[in-house]
Amino acid sequence: MKLAHKNSLVPVFYADTHNLHQPLYEYDRGLQIPYQEIPRRIEAAKAALCALPFTKLINPSRRLTEAFCLNLHAAALIDYLKRSSIQAAKLQQEHPDQGEVYLTPWIYPLKPAMASGLRNSPEAMGCFAFDLYAPVGEHSWEAVFASANLAFTAADAVLRGETQIAYALCRPPGHHAGYDYTGGYCYLNNAAIAAESLLPLGAGAILDIDYHHGNGTQEIFWERADVLYVSIHADPRAEYPFYSGFAEERGGKAAFDKNLNLPLPMGSGDTVYLHALDKALAAIQNMEAQWLVLSAGYDTCHEDPTTTFTLTDAVYAEIGKRIAKLQIPVVIVHEGGYAVEANGRLAAQLLSGLFLN
Ligand code: OKP
Ligand code: ZN
């Protein structure tokens, strides 16, 4: 049976606002290196997706509200992001010679007793970030909210029955952002926002195919039986984020077995990967998911400079094809991928596999 979307164009949601968020550096075990999560990543994906004959680009107006974000995130996190952007703007003005100012946490409350004082201090950043990879500049909040708005509006198009497939070109990405913290280039959890929007259709699933475990998404839906979170990622014993993504993590009391982690050995390739994918898809089918949010990271590909998997291009089309067999609406949310131009090629492969099944 063919899906009804065949006659219509797949909407690709994009906002140029992401270009305003451009941290310059990150730290890799003490070495200062260029920030890997760069604007060109999403521009490459935009170009490649626009070039497909069955897509249309949508520049959505702002429809997401802060109130809606509170279903997924703490008010304190949103407050922190807004305040930090204002703080960065102020500092930028005071130091026009400094280049772009991006605030980073520099004191972390390792123990609960350290948190209460720090939280109320002017140096509270470490209370809202689990690592150094989510610095905040003057336009970061604007870019972060616009990125989340893409996930929201893409999901909303599906919810309204306008399409069966939508692609949200989110940047910054989202799957490491938890209930009340940022980290790993992520500030708000775009996939979680898309999933929450789709709930009127019934229970559903998030499939996370980024190379890294989506610790934030897992945390947000830990106690939620209406959203299955399934992730295929590199073994957290050896890979970021190190503290979550283990197979033993199966969900909270209220949602046991609504969390499925499929960690793979470092250096995994096509065969092993597709085998894990079939397990993931079986779990999604078993819970009778009515919709799917796909956290699509392309850092699993052989040419990614920051990771170890060796997936070939053909696998991304195959992932799309196998997902299409679920016969449920799919919202794709762009996550990682640091082989910059590959983001375009592989996003196009994935979407083609899904649409032209
Ligand atoms: C974000 B996403 C040091 C490595 C730090 C942070 C990984 C963030 C991944 N250079 N890496 O899941 O693609
Ligand atoms: Zn990743």
Image (cartoon, grey):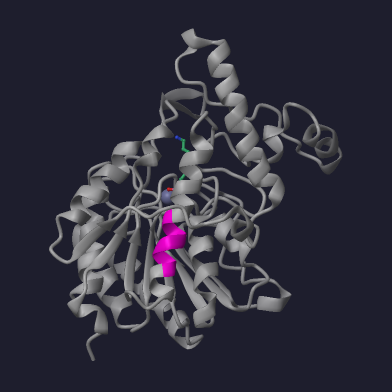
* Residue 51 falls left or right of residue 176: left
Furthest toward the top, the residue is 97
Q: Which residues are magenta?
A: 150-156
User: Above or below — where is 170 with respect to 131?
Assistant: below
- The residue sitting at 68% across, 35% down in the picture is 126
Residue 64 position within the rendered picture, expressed as x and y whole percent measured from the top left: 51, 57
Closer to us: 258 or 181? 181
The image quadrant where one finds the N terminus is bottom left
The image quadrant where one finds the C terminus is bottom left
Residue 143 position within the rendered picture, expressed as x and y whole percent measured from the top left: 46, 41
Tell me, yes or no, whether the highlighted magenta stretch contains residue 11. no
Asked if residue 132 shows in the view, the reply is yes
User: Above or below — where is 144 with respect to 90?
Assistant: below
Residue 128 position within the rendered picture, expressed as x and y whole percent measured from the top left: 67, 41
**How many numbered discs sit on the rendered protein?**
0
Residue 355 position within the rendered picture, expressed as x and y whole percent measured from the top left: 22, 73
Secondary structure that dominates the magenta span: helix
Determine which quarter of the picture holds residue 49. Answer: bottom left
Asked if residue 264 shows in the view, the reply is no
* Residue 180 falls left or right of residue 203: right
- The residue sitting at 33% across, 66% down in the picture is 166
Closer to us: 108 or 104? 104
User: Above or below — where is 312 with respect to 356?
Assistant: above
- The residue sitting at 53% across, 62% down in the picture is 192
